[in-house]
Amino acid sequence: MAVRQIREIGDNLLRKKSRPFETVDDKARQLLEDLYDTLKVTKDGVGLAAPQVGVLRRAIVVDLSMEEENPQGPFFLINPVIVKQSGSQVCREGCLSVPGKLGDVTRPEKVTVEALDKNGKKVKIKAEGLLAVVLSHEIDHLDGILFVDKATEIFDQDELQEEERWVIEYSIYGDSRVCTFNFGRDI
Ligand code: NI
């Protein structure tokens, strides 16, 4: 088990583009394991990308297995690419690399992601809702993009403690799908 230190906003490495893997070798598998171990020791993280632990390679881990509604994962993905997307949804996101902040971000409602798994086998994931958000967020990390770049509004987490306040704020989004799950975590 190797828990790595998570890089935070202001660190230039988070802004760089990550390199793809040519083959899924032991080094790639070790990186995926380290990402998973690091994610698991966070309080409520649901995704982590390699640049967040200082490695500029295209690898992400997404784990929604603890979700009450529709648990999915963990997914260990090498060279993930969004090959199809549709619709839109607004979610309040957080990120382990941007502690204490949340932001409202518009993401596709549905995405199809192609990637390689731990064994180098091609996989296709058809995701919607929260899983689509998390995959989009993590793949953005591989291109040096953070949620704060896309957020229409950014909040201090401390100021958003009351769940009820969120519900009121969400009602303004009209016909967009709105995520009501509790954030304060990396997605
Ligand atoms: Ni993040």
Image (tube, rainbow, N blue to C red):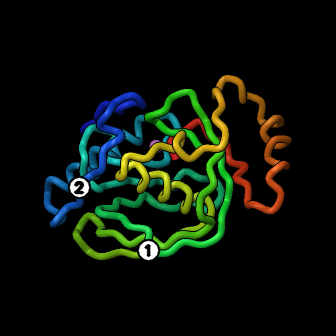
The quadrant the N terminus occupies is: top left
Res 126 seen here: no
Where residue 63 appears, as percent x and y from the top left, is 46, 53
Does residue 176 appear to the left or right of 27 in the view shown?
right
Residue 74, compared with residue 115, is above or below; it is: above
The residue carrying mark 2 is 19
Residue drawn 71% across and 24% down?
A: 159
Q: Which mark is residue 14?
A: none
Whether residue 45 sits left or right of residue 24 in the image: it is: right
Counting residues from the start of the chain, the first of labels 2 and 1 encountered is 2
Amino acid type, mark 1: Val
Mark 1 lies on residue: 83
- Indicate the position of residue 28 as horizontal and vertical percent values: 20, 56
Identify the residue at horizontal 41%, vertical 75% (top origin): 124
Helix, strand or loop at label 1? It is: strand
CB at mark 1 closer than 8 A to ligand 1?
Answer: no
Q: Is residue 152 left or right of residue 124?
A: right
Q: Residue furthest top?
A: 158
> In the image, residue 45 lies at what x, y percent?
49, 42
What is the count of numbered marks?
2
Question: Quadrant of the rendered structure where residue 182 is?
Answer: top right
Q: What is the three-letter code of the residue carrying label 2?
A: Arg
Left-right relation of 155 to 76: right
Report x, y in % for residue 24. 18, 64
Q: CA distance from mark 2 to mark 1?
A: 18 Å
